[in-house]
Image: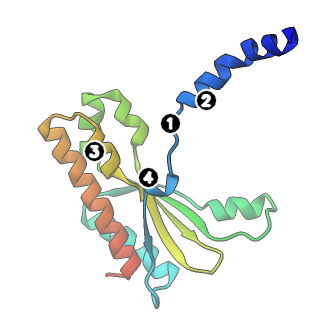
């Protein structure tokens, strides 16, 4: 009995902390767009990059994760690439308003080819963050602008537009 009581006392803080952690359905925190049939992965990537450039969203980083997977000798590698975009003027203004927004920059769109060979673009659902943040009107409008452009970039890529 005494040993059980000691165990409960030792592990109670961990149990309480774990119970307080929010639980998210990760699928509800992202936006996914399937690459349309007839659009190659290369066409989708090219369209996405060209459209981003047209919208003043600079490609600031590219991480071909599947190449890293292969280099590590991992089996059954599906194509996975992370593209990071940024509008530097907006980024500067957001960070000057609140340094915490730096954690969400640059904006990422990930290309993933699933087990069935279907290509997808996946990004964070900025609606969640924009709706929950208490932003002044100007910063709110800038955040909406970035969200809208990211969706346009994904749509252009998914449809092979351009």
Q: Residue at x 34, y 50 (%)?
A: 126
Residue 140's x, y, as percent? 19, 42
Q: Nearer the viewer, residue 40 or 46?
A: 40
Q: Is residue 86 visible?
A: no
Dot 1 corresponds to which residue?
22
Q: Residue furthest bottom?
A: 38
User: Label 2's element?
Assistant: helix
Q: Quadrant of the N terminus?
A: top right
Assign the C terminus to one quadrant of the image.
bottom left
- Indicate left or right for 12 with 49 as reference: right
Viewer-nearest of labels 3 and 2? 2
Which residue lies under the disc numbered 4? 29
In space, the residues marked 3 and 2 are separated at their CA atoms by 27 Å
Comes first in the chain, label 1 or label 3: 1
On screen, residue 86 above or below 8: below
Q: Residues within 10 Å of mark 3 (few under 14, many from 20)?
A: some
- Callout 4: helix, strand or loop? helix
Judged from the image, the secondary structure of the residue bearing numbered disc 1 is loop
Mark seen at residue 73: none
Q: Horizontal placement of 82 versus 130: left or right?
A: right
- Count neighbours of disc 4 (C-alpha within 10 A) and say few if under 14, some if 14 to 19, many if 20 or more: some
Asked which secondary structure carries label 3, the reply is helix
**Sequence order check: which comes first, mark 4 or mark 1?**
1
Give residue 9's position: percent from left, percent from top.
73, 12
Distance between the alpha carbons at the discs numbered 4 and 1: 13 Å
Q: Residue placed farthest to the front in the image?
A: 1
- Is the image coloured rainbow, by chain, by secondary structure, or in one colour? rainbow
Spot occupied by residue 14 in the image (x, y as percentages of width and height)? 67, 22
Label 1–label 3 contact, CB within 8 A: no
For the point 75% across and 16% down, the residue is 8
Q: Provide the residue designation for mark 2.
A: 18
Depth order, front residue of 21/54: 21
């Amino acid at each position: 009995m005494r040993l059980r009581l000691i165990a409960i006392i030792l592990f109670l803080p961990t149990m309480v902390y774990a119970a307080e952690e929010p639980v998210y359905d990760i699928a509800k925190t992202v936006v996914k767009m399937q690459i349309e049939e007839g659009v190659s992965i290369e066409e989708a990537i090219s369209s996405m990059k060209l459209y981003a450039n047209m919208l003043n969203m600079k490609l600031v980083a590219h991480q071909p994760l599947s190449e890293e997977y292969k280099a590590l000798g991992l089996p059954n590698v599906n194509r996975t690439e992370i593209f990071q975009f940024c509008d530097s003027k907006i980024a500067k203004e957001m960070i000057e308003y609140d340094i915490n927004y730096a954690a969400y920059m640059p904006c990422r769109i990930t290309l993933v080819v699933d087990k069935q060979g279907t290509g997808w673009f996946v990004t964070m659902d900025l609606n969640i963050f924009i709706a929950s943040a208490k932003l002044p009107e100007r910063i709110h409008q800038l955040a909406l602008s970035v969200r809208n452009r990211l969706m346009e970039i994904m749509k252009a890529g998914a449809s092979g537009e351009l």
